[in-house]
Image (spheres, helix red, strand yellow):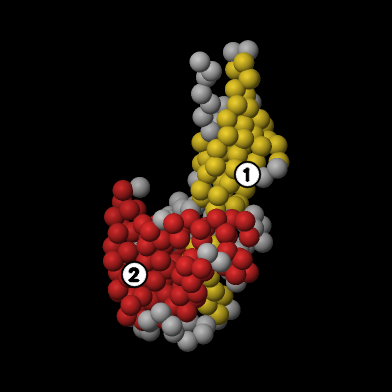
Amino acid sequence: MEKIRRKLVGMILLGIMLFVMVGCGTEEGTATNKVAKFRDYIEMQNGEDFFETTEVDEDTYWTVKEARGIVNKLKDNKDENQEIMSVLSAQAQHYDAGGKQNKEYDLYDDVTAIGPVYVAEEDGEIVLRVRPHDVTIVTEPGATVTFLEEEYEADENGEIEIGKLGPGHYEVEATVEKDGETLEMSDTVFLFEYEDFSPNIVLEFNDKE
């Protein structure tokens, strides 16, 4: 994680510089224009337009509720906002700059493979996409978990494979029978990964006093 953060710090500084260099109001259809629109969605806390104008894989769960949660979170969290905007700005430069120039700014082997929201090129068109997170819940073996209004039972390893979710806030509840007692827990998790998109949601039960 520290290695990732160090790279992100570099991207923060570089991304801010690049975003200033290429400007905030470039022509329609450019990568920088897509990033500028996302910045505006955050500023206006406009989760609806963010959801409507962003691409997501068909097999990925992601709704306007999660989109609203993202823009609200980024509006309120200056550091998180700066991180994702710097990554997106570096990606925009990757697409909008020509020839060898774009490679000079790629701090990763593939800068487009970074970030929970990212810039992509599809059929010659620049789009903004959300990254699928392949989620596994890790908890007590045999625990019953309620997630997205579905009920699951953890296997002998305490694992439940949920599948692909888009970034955002998710609520989870769980119960388990342990030593003759029923233990309960609930939590809200925020999925917003930058490099590892197979995260575990770890649910830990606290024994009753």
Dividing the picture into quarters, in which one does residue 157 lie? top right
Q: Which residue is at 51% across, 36% downward?
A: 202
Residue 104's x, y, as percent?
30, 74
Mark 2, secondary structure of its residue:
helix
According to the picture, the residue beneath numbered tag 2 turns out to be 15
Q: Which residue is at 46% across, 53% downward?
A: 193
Label 1 – label 2 distance at C-alpha: 34 Å
Q: Which residue is at 60% across, 52% downward?
A: 164
Residue 121's x, y, as percent?
52, 75
Identify the disc placed on residue 18: none
* Rendered position, 188 above or below 84: above
Q: Neighbour class for label 2 at 10 Å: few (<14), some, many (≥20)?
A: many
Dividing the picture into quarters, in which one does residue 158 lie? top right
Q: Neighbour class for label 1 at 10 Å: few (<14), some, many (≥20)?
A: some
Residue type at numbered disc 2:
Gly
Residue 88's x, y, as percent?
42, 68
* Rendered position, 209 above or below 165: above
Mark 1, secondary structure of its residue:
strand
Q: Which residue is at 51% across, 61% downward?
A: 71
Residue type at numbered disc 1:
Ile
* Residue 141, visible in the rendered structure: no
* Rendered position, 123 above or below 138: below
Identify the disc placed on residue 162: 1
Residue 138's x, y, as percent?
54, 35
* Residue closest to the eye, 160 or 85: 85
* Residue closest to the eye, 24 or 179: 24
Q: Earlier in the sequence, mark 1 or mark 2?
A: 2
